[in-house]
Image: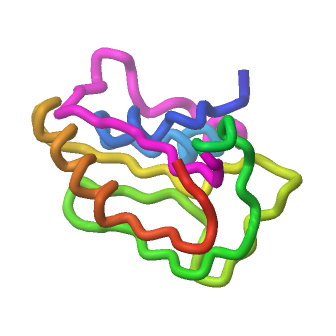
Amino acid sequence: NTRIQVEHPVTEMVTGIDLVKLQLQVAMGDVLPYKQEDIKLTGHAIEFRINAENPYKNFMPSPGKIEQYLAPGGYGVRIESACYTNYTIPPYYDSMVAKLIIHEPTRDEAIMAGIRALSEFVVLGIDTT
């Protein structure tokens, strides 16, 4: 299966391995540089999805112009998004605005860092979940 899961950043964070890069290398005929026993897991990672949806309208899509976009940052915080201030969320596609991935040494620390990062994430102009 050549499809990479939308959650692949969680695996990348706990392994330190760029799965997309590896997938492209294998597609070009390269051999995987790792054996399963070479892969070491470190810490805990959690992925949060920020979607353009209205939770008060049965999670209907919320297309429109993002008036302000400010993603959190810091050690152990990863954002995957193509959005920015003044970007327009179209009504025709997936409503995902961003993926927020947190990596910390323990599960409890990852949860707390996720709560902090979510509280710092600013997306104004559209409804989000």
Which quadrant would residue 73 be assigned to in this image?
bottom left
The vertical placement of 95 against 67, above or below, is above
Q: Residue drawn at (40%, 28%), measured in percent from left and top?
A: 34
Which quadrant would residue 90 be assigned to in this image?
bottom right
Which quadrant would residue 117 be assigned to in this image?
bottom left
Q: Is residue 125 left or right of residue 92?
A: left
Frontmost residue, 60 versus 6: 60
Image spot of residue 81 (x, y percent): 56, 61
Q: Per the image, is 51 magenta?
A: yes
Image spot of residue 39 (x, y percent): 30, 25
The vertical placement of 79 against 20, above or below, is below
Image spot of residue 45 (x, y percent): 29, 36
Q: Residue drawn at (30%, 66%), measured in percent from left and top?
A: 120
Q: In this view, does 61 lie to the left or right of 79?
A: right
Give the residue furthest to the front: 56
Q: In this view, does 64 lie to the left or right of 38?
A: right
Q: Per the image, is 70 magenta?
A: no
Assign the N terminus to one quadrant of the image: top right
Chosen colour scheme? rainbow
Give the residue furthest to the right: 92
Q: In this view, does 9 lie to the left or right of 57?
A: left
Span colored in magenta: 25-54
Q: Residue drawn at (63%, 33%), measured in percent from left and top?
A: 4
Frontmost residue, 105 versus 41: 105
